[in-house]
Image: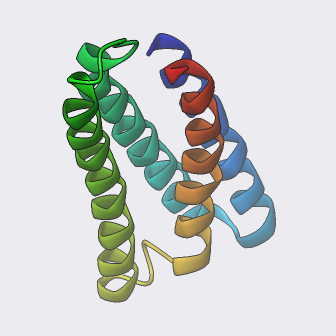
Amino acid sequence: MKLTGLAGVLLSAVMAGIAWRAWGEASAIAALIFGLIATAIQVGALAIMAPVRGGKSSATLPRFMARWGVGMGLRMAGVIALAVLAAVDRTHFPAFPAALGFLGVLLPLLALEVRLVR
């Protein structure tokens, strides 16, 4: 989980830099905030999965799938938070830079999770 957290913080900084260069300071802050939210969600999802990772018995499959579903629910909650904040406060959370921060961090961390869960 430390690797995921570090990778998420670094990716958040990169996404904020891209947003700052393309759209300015407010966009960079939105991208950074949603990148850090994505990092927190991913670290939380990995923590939820930790007790059932690497189980060899088929009895653990339902527990694994239930915990995986909770992690996906957390990720969906992040998407909903992004949509709500972008709709409510467009000046502080412009939609495209915030989505860039969220997805630009979450998707690479999901790919990293696949390697970690094996």
Q: Which colour scheme is used?
A: rainbow
Residue lying at 54% horizontally and 30% vertically, measured from the top left: 113
Name the residue: 30% across, 32% down.
44
Residue 107 x, y percent position in the rendering: 61, 49
Q: In this view, does 42 lie above or below 107?
A: above
- Say above or below: 86 vs 6: below
108 or 60: nearer the eye? 60
Give the side of residue 35 with respect to residue 45, left or right: right
When the figure is inspected, residue 83 is found, relative to residue 17, above or below; the finding is below
| Whether residue 49 is situated above or below residue 75 in the rendered picture | above
Q: Position of residue 92 (x, y in %)?
A: 42, 72
Residue placed at 27% from the left, 62% from the top? 77
> In which quadrant of the rendered image does the N terminus lie?
top left
- Picture quarter with the C terminus: top right
The residue depicted at 80 percent of the width and 60 percent of the height is 21
Residue 90 position in % (x across, y down) = 43, 84
- For the residue pair 28 and 72, the one nearer the viewer reads as 72
User: Where's residue 47, x and y in %?
Assistant: 29, 22
